[in-house]
Image: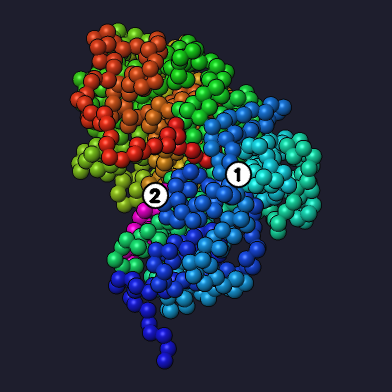
Amino acid sequence: MGRPARPDPHTSPSPALRVAVIGGGPGGLYAAALLKRLDPAREITVWERNAPEDTFGFGVVLSDETLGGIEHADPAVYQALQDAFVRWDDIHIAHRGHLLTSSGHGFAALGRRRLLEILHARCAELGVRLRFRTEAPPAAELAATHDLVVAADGVHSRTREAHADVFRPRITTHRCRYIWLAADFAFDAFRFEIAETEHGVMQLHAYPFSADSSTVIVEMREEVWRAAGFDELDEAESTSRCAKIFAEALGGRALRSNKSSWTAFRTVSNARWSHGRTVLLGDAAHTAHFSIGSGTKLAVEDALALAACVEERPTLEEALAAYESERRPVVESTQRAAAASLRWFEELAGYLDQPPRQFAFNLLTRSRRVTHDNLRLRDPAFTDSVERDFGCPPGTPPMFTPFRLRGLTLRNRIVVSPMDLYVAEDGIPGDFHLVHLGARALGGAGLVMTEMVCVSPEGRITPGCTGLWTDEQADAWSRITAFVHERSPGTAIGVQLGHSGRKGSTRRMWEGIDQPLPDGNWPLTAASPLPYRPGVNQIPHALDRAGLTAVRKEFVAAARRAARAGFDLLELHCAHGYLLSGFLSPLTNLRDDAYGGPLENRLRFPLEVFDAVREVWPDDRPTTVRISATDWAEGGTTAEDAVEIARAFAAHGADALDVSTGQVVPDERPEYGRSYQTPYADRIRNALAVPVIAVGAISSWDDVNSLLLAGRADLCALARPHLYDPHWTLHAAAAQTYQGPAAPWPDPYRAGSRPPPTGRTDAPKPRLTLGRPPRTVPPRPATARAAP
């Protein structure tokens, strides 16, 4: 008689759960060990096509957080790891003759082979069946005879590819080549070394993993790799060449390889992680760049979560759903941090001219996991030195240092970002605008920006938009600028001028964003006759020569009124798919005249408008330009295009670039996350040495300080935080115990400059403990340790 069919996954897992694990890496082995430890009756088999002693790569770094999970789940594995670990606290950054050290980071590493030995031994001890040198049957075949199939078969997962229609993988190949090597001595810190060669920039990442061995990763851009001839070298030749390039870091010692080959990192993500009885784990489900040391960490944490969910949930279906629900947000957050780190190294050449300590700070904070405040806890002396180089007076956080644009000196680096309110009548700003902008000016920001102020009735987004096409509107704006200047001296107020283009004649945001008005629509103009949403929004009229001239004159007239109204700064809105942005993007500009085609032509009209506005704007007052640095859509504006757009506006006299992204086409796919737009500002600033305003989910004063100190931005614009808290800047000063001139509390508000007292929530502590010995509680670390 054959084996009975396995239970349906919708029913409760069998007490004698039968599990197949495809792949004998750390994630698969640990999942097998945990599932077996939680129920010894389970029949668990691991298939591994390599021999037990085979492994690729060299050292593995694990975080304190991951180790804590292991300690609670399996003390035996935890103790074995503890016995094998090497630990260190320092990061060394070598660049252009300088060796900088940052301390207090807390790393733990061991050899990958030793990690596998520990897990092999634990699996054998628990009764897990290990089948080495054996290719696993296909997952579909295993699922017919097993209750659960764990596909831990790596970045090139055959399981994922066999069921790609269900998992729907998305794989992105990146722009650097790298190779895993080893050195037969132990570095005394995590070391980053930069080599500037005749072929381009190369970098070394190295760390110890035993008392006498270190992992060494050499990485460089694809074009540098080819120019250096690595594409023509075999494994031994590549290894020898890398040792010569980084001879100083290695002390002249050799490197060794282990079936090492050059590869380009691939970021893997999946729309789903499970299919029936089969579930993806580790690199099969997701990858995150090695520069934040996350691959093994994520796989082990996956194993912990999967075993717990199988144990806790009544059915396999619920267990796999819970596993994905628990792990996906954590993984996606890690992938965002890893992507930021990966891009930083891809763009490394653009940072090499930074001062040494700023360069080091930039490297340490590249993933946004380590921040200014976090680094201050780890290494206050290093952070103090970076602040001194930046120009921070004693006791002054970076965000409260002044910044000069042309004849305007801003008392701090905080900008209240433009936010459309949609409450104007006939384009006239009213009491709501006075209170909104006045409150944020009183709240301490260095610069407060208006919403997009439209240059004509036809250039409005909605009937509720403000304008500057009449003198009555200018008079109303004068009332607001006068309030800001009189009641919040030292705060600057700027105006953002724009024209809606094809995105106009729509309802107010809360009535249906980008939806046309039910009646009373006005005709639209744009670069090309393309509706924003086909079948929803109206088809705009493509501007001809006369129309271009008329629009340019409208911008000039509005700029003149803005100057008379008392604005300190003017920003030209060339972003978010509005009229001028529509000329810049190849997705919205399909013209075949002098204003369409190559980027040089697409820039022509926005630059004509900028030049005309700059000519009538007072010479001592600055002008900025907001751009969308990417359309987040295939075939649209690229990061490289954004640098050239910024270069053109800077050459025409723009004092700063306000770097936003997207909102140009409705089918965009933004990579949302904390500070997700700031890398585009960073790239423009360091490529062109022009001031930039960074925007995009910057939510904390710690983020602001980090961006400024790292040289990624000169000013930071925040929108939603200022809606939540009009006094955001003053509260940021109070949180950092700053009381200097860059964040003065208005006289009537000074009594509220400290948090109000609250009721007691702590109970009286017991004075005596009787009947049992005192308990000693080990001190908690000052801060969690995150990978750099």
> Which numbered dot is residue 329?
2
Residue 57 in view (yes/no): yes
Q: Crowding near pointer 2: few (<14 within 10 Å), some, many (20+)? A: few
In the image: residue 381, left or right of residue 323: right
Q: Which mark is residue 86?
A: 1
Tell me: residue 419, above or below residue 168.
Answer: above
Vertical position of residue 434 compared to residue 228: above or below: above
At horizontal 40% and vertical 26% (from top left) the residue drawn is 701
| Residue 38, numbered circle | none
Q: How is the image coloured?
A: rainbow
Q: Quadrant of residue 498?
A: top left
Residue 153 placement (x, y as % from top left): 53, 64
Q: Position of residue 49 (x, y in %)?
A: 60, 70
Mark 1, other Cα within 10 Å: few <14 / some 14–19 / many ≥20: some
Q: Is residue 330 highlighted in magenta?
A: yes
Magenta extent: 317-331
